[in-house]
Amino acid sequence: MKILLVSHFFPPQRNAGAEQRVLGYAVELQQRGHTVQVLCAGDWEASAEHWNGFTDEVHQGVMVRRVNLNWTRAEDPNRCLYDNALVDFNTGSWLEEYQPDVVHIISLITLGAGVVHAAQKRDLPVLFTLTDFWMICPKINLVRGDGSLCDGRATDWECLRCMLWNAGLFKGLKSLLPEALLKAILTGVSRRAWLSHLRGFRGMALDMKDRRRVMADMAKEIDCVTAPSTYLAKVIEDNGIFSSPVRVIHSGHDLSWLNGSTEKTTGDAIRFGYVGQLIPIKGVDALIAAFQSAVTNGNASLSIYGNAELGPTYAASLQAMVRNGDPIHFMGPFAREQLAEVMAGIDVLVVPSRWHENNPRVIQEAFASKTPVIGANVGGIAEFIEHDVNGLLFQYDSVSDLQVQIERVLTEPGIVERLRKGIKPVKTISEEMDEIEELYRSLIKTKNRQV
């Protein structure tokens, strides 16, 4: 089969969970004898023009076409974040050139609905594997401006207000105008393309009514939708985006980094760890506060892995929380080849997220190395952590309850080893691809019957 994989970004430029998923798919499919090409964004906001063509390259043996865009230079920057006519037009010509048997989308955050439109016009089967809430939330994470969680069933105005929440212009208008007048003015602003270039509106004042229409139209052009967690599938289904059920296919993982070993390095203190982005919704500040309250006698340490340069203000605030003598260490980022070494130095991983994580890859990576996980009881985190079996759950956004769980690890004899024994084998990328490959064949067969 010839397969086109579509992602927002791709390694080595970006290396988050979705990007690693696409790379894993591509490598595994090629090992099975299929021809694969990845389509993704390259430059995203650095060039002088909106459209800057594309570059072709090979990464780890995978053909990659990177579309070079500067969304901020588009005629309508806000609309191009979800529906870019140039992507539609150019993807069409590339599809005719490559002639894939199936288009498998993992993320459309950068390229938008145009990819689906182009595939549908050419009667190509389209599979969409959801990795976030992009189709129902332009912020992707279903977290409101005030930090509370959203279920996606919000009005156009509620979504627009959420997007603008932290903008200085919005705050100023909000303090001066009644809600009804504020709604009318900002809704009008969101529907005028020329205003989307203005600071305070660009990237935020999206026309929510139009975005919902585009998402609904796009959903009709997608042949099959999968999700890596039951939680994500349910949220999407509850919002009525697709006419047919979302199929749950749990993520598989490339475990070659383990080298067959789950041995831990040893130490006198319990070693807690965090691995991920240093951004507010990840809750690292709550972890630091809970750890500081729980650890009083030097019987534990906390290592925080993440790139401070991607969120320097928040990272600086985290570092400012650490007091002299605190056994808290900022380790910076690391190459994937070092993952086994990192996990070997962590006894308990903590995932303190403040948003509906649907299937954090780091949890499965921890389990693969026989590392128990303390996680927030929210979203897909609670779907994969069994409390008191392979990890511990704490009440969402509760520093005090996280402190309680950390204290349990420190005080209950044998708890870490007991939780390690409760960890089940992690699903491999090969096992997942068996399911995906069969789905490809079914979609191609169905589409051929319809043509």
Image (tube, rainbow, N blue to C red):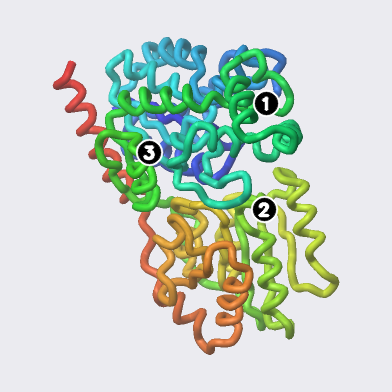
Quadrant location of the N terminus?
top left
Above-or-below relation of 255 to 212: below
Q: Could you tell me if residue 34 is visible in this image?
A: yes
- Please indicate whether residue 116 sits to the left or right of residue 393 in the image: left
Which comes sooner in the sequence, label 2 or label 1?
1
Pick the front one: 160 or 345 = 160
Provide residue 204's location: percent of width, then percent of height. Answer: 62, 30
Position above or below: 49 against 296: above
Tell which residue pokes out farthest to the bottom in this image. 413
Category of crowding for the residue at label 3, using alpha-carbon neighbours closer than 10 angstroms: few (below 14), some (14–19), many (at least 20): many
Q: Residues within 10 Å of mark 2 (few under 14, many from 20)?
A: many
Q: Amino acid at mark 2?
A: Gly
Rendered location of residue 2, percent (x, y): 33, 25
Amino acid type at mark 1: Phe
In space, the residues marked 2 and 3 are separated at their CA atoms by 26 Å
| Labels in figure, total | 3
- Residue appearing at x 60%, y 83% in the figure: 410
> Which disc number belongs to residue 201?
1
Which residue position is annotated with label 3? 129
Mark number displayed over residue 118? none
273, 72: nearer the viewer: 72
Marks 2 and 1, how far apart in space?
Answer: 30 Å
Nearer the camera: disc 2 or disc 1: 1
Amino acid residing under circle 3: Thr
Question: Which image quadrant is residue 347 in?
Answer: bottom right
Q: Secondary structure at mark 3?
A: strand
Dividing the picture into quadrants, the one containing residue 244 is top left
